Amino acid sequence: MASQKGTKMTSQEHHELVWGWLFVLPTMAGLIILNFVPIIQTIWQSFCKTGAFGKGNVFIGLENYKNMIADGQVWQSLLNTIIYTVIEVPISIAIALVLAVLLNRKMKGRSIYRTIFFLPMVAAPAAVAMVWRWLYNSDFGLLNHMLNAVGIPSVNWISDPKIALVSVAIGAVIMLVPFIWMILTAFKSATEATQMDPFVIFPAVWRTEGFSNVLRKMDFIKLYLNTIILIVGRVVCAVLTATMAGYALGRLNFKGKKLCFSLIMLQMMVPSQIFIIPQYLMISKMGMFNTMFALIFPGLVTAFGTFLLRQSYMGLPKDLEEAARLDGCNIGQTFLYIMAPLTRSGMVSLGIFTALFAFKDLMWPLIVNSEQSTMPLSAALAKLQGTFVANYPELMAASLLACIPMIVLYVIFQKQFIEGIATSGGKL
């Protein structure tokens, strides 16, 4: 009996090992290729210098690090980063907490207020930058105009070193608050889906001249199509790989599980800027510039999404799996027919997050795409700005048109989005 029991346990462990690695392998392979190889390349190149005529790398040991330590600007940048973080994080959390408490109460128009507070998350980066540049302009900016109206002299908000960092941090707080607010709102309660008309916040805007000018100058249908391909490609890849890896890491016991999870957590802590140059070189070697694949490439897998869905799976009762196995389901069938459908709210949350990040991604599309025919909206809006003069009405009109799909997406899936975040934060 003991021998049979031991054999049975060994068989179950073998199945979990096979299925666990089958589920987690796509994510781990993607993270190794897209993130960990670039990290290793970055570390190696930090000990080198570029060879003659920009070819090859020459090993120079710790010389680069010695130069950095001796450079006063590096230490000043570090200090600026600390100050920036100290200003941004506590203030953002405090404001978001107050908003979460207020907007969680029963009140008339709550869904409208929530959608309005969601807007900064879907605003095009180019438009946001232009708005803040206008607000902070030392000659005709709105802030200085208000100060002058009460007898206070103008302030050089972004050119004065004494206050420039604070000015930038204030703008970052405004953009970060909606994200934290949604997280806090989700943990406060999972609310009912809104029935609000998604266009209620755009009254009579369609008749303005700005929209007609934008539609004439930009092939908006093509840009929309490129953006949709970008978003759908990243969402499908992220949700598919993350839900399999999340199930393996959350429900199965297999050798190497802790290592995989540690690598995923490590990747989440590394700044994304480290990956840009190595990923750019990968796209270059593949000859994939100005293609939709180049846009989707960095989002083929997601460490954040894997963590999010792992938490969702860990919150499900064990009885479900045991009942499925008693009915004759193997691990794959249990995942596909029982467990995965129960985490659809988490999948929706990940899908919306991925769509938001893909929609707002500006740097990568500008790096790998130079032709408008393959640009998404974020990059096209950046190109819409003039070299010396910006047409603010046209830029704002184009930005508003670009935001509409993301706002509609949030309105439709608001309930699942909030529920998905709420059910994914229970266990570590």
Image: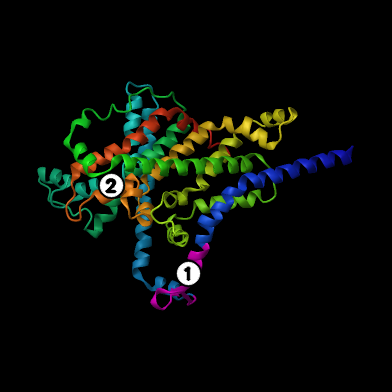
**Amino acid at the residue labelled 2:** Leu
Q: Can you tell which quarter of the image residue 327 is in? A: top right
Disc 1, disc 2: CB below 8 Å? no
Label 1 Cα crowd, 10 Å radius (few <14 / some 14-19 / many 20+)? some
Q: Nearer the viewer, residue 376 or 147?
A: 376
Q: Position of residue 187 (x, y in %)?
A: 47, 33
Q: Position of residue 145 (x, y in %)?
A: 13, 45
Residue at left 44%, top 25%? 191
- Residue 381 is tagged as 2
Q: Which mark is residue 45?
A: 1
Q: Is residue 428 visible?
A: no
Q: Residue at x 84, y 42 (%)?
A: 6
Q: Residue 301 vs residue 414: left or right? A: right
- Is residue 11 rendered to the left or right of residue 36? right
Q: Secondary structure at mark 1?
A: helix
Disc 1 or 2, which lies upstream in sequence? 1
The type of residue carrying mark 1 is Gln
**Distance CA(mark 1)–CA(mark 2):** 34 Å
- Residue 13, visible in the rendered structure: yes
The residue tagged with tag 2: helix, strand or loop? helix
Callout in the foreground (1, 2): 2
The quadrant where residue 366 appears:
bottom left
Which residues make up the magenta segment?
40-61
